[in-house]
Image (cartoon, rainbow, N blue to C red):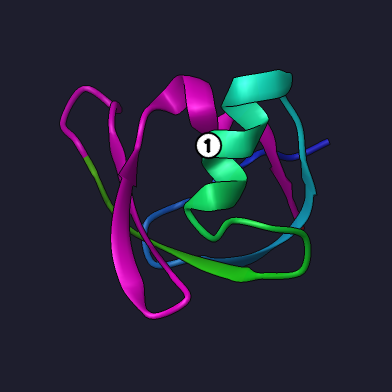
Amino acid sequence: MRTLKDAKIGETVRVTKVGGEGAIKRRIMDMGITKGVSIKVMKVAPLGDPIEITVRGYELTLRKADCQNIEVE
């Protein structure tokens, strides 16, 4: 299982599953991160948290904890 947290800068990945429970999963899906969508990793902060991504044509910053709930290929 590979998560968004493991993706490298400049890499484009496809979401295979959105994990988490209740409000966490709903919040991730409300941001447009759903199964099958492509995500490009743009930047990672110096200490590794947060991670800036591009999804559905807009830029989004996610915490590492949220990225662990997003499985990718």
Q: Is residue 44 left or right of residue 69?
A: left
Could you tell me which residue is drawn at 47 percent across and 53 percent down?
31
| Quadrant in which the C terminus appears | bottom right
Is 55 in the magenta? yes
For the residue pair 51 and 26, the one nearer the viewer reads as: 26
Residue 33 is drawn in which quadrant?
bottom right
How many marks on residues?
A: 1
Q: Is residue 65 above or below residue 43?
A: above
For residue 13, above or below residue 66: below
Q: Describe the element under mark 1 as helix, strand or loop.
A: helix
Extreme-bottom residue of the structure: 57
Task: Identify which residue is drawn at 53% across, 36% down.
Answer: 27
Q: Name which residue lies at 66% across and 32% down.
A: 25
What segment is highlighted magenta in the picture? 45-72
- According to the picture, the residue beneath numbered tag 1 turns out to be 27
Which amino acid lies under the numbered mark 1 shown in the image of this protein?
Answer: Arg
- Provide residue 23's location: percent of width, then percent of height: 60, 23
Judge from the rendering whether residue 26 lies leftward or rightward of residue 46; answer left or right: right
Q: Nearer the viewer, residue 27 or 42?
A: 27
In the rendered image, residue 64 lying in the magenta stretch gets the answer yes
State left or right for residue 3 relative to residue 65. right
In the rendered view, would you say 57 is above or below 40?
A: below
- Residue at 74% x, 40% y: name it: 2
Give the percent coordinates (x, y) of residue 60. Answer: 31, 54
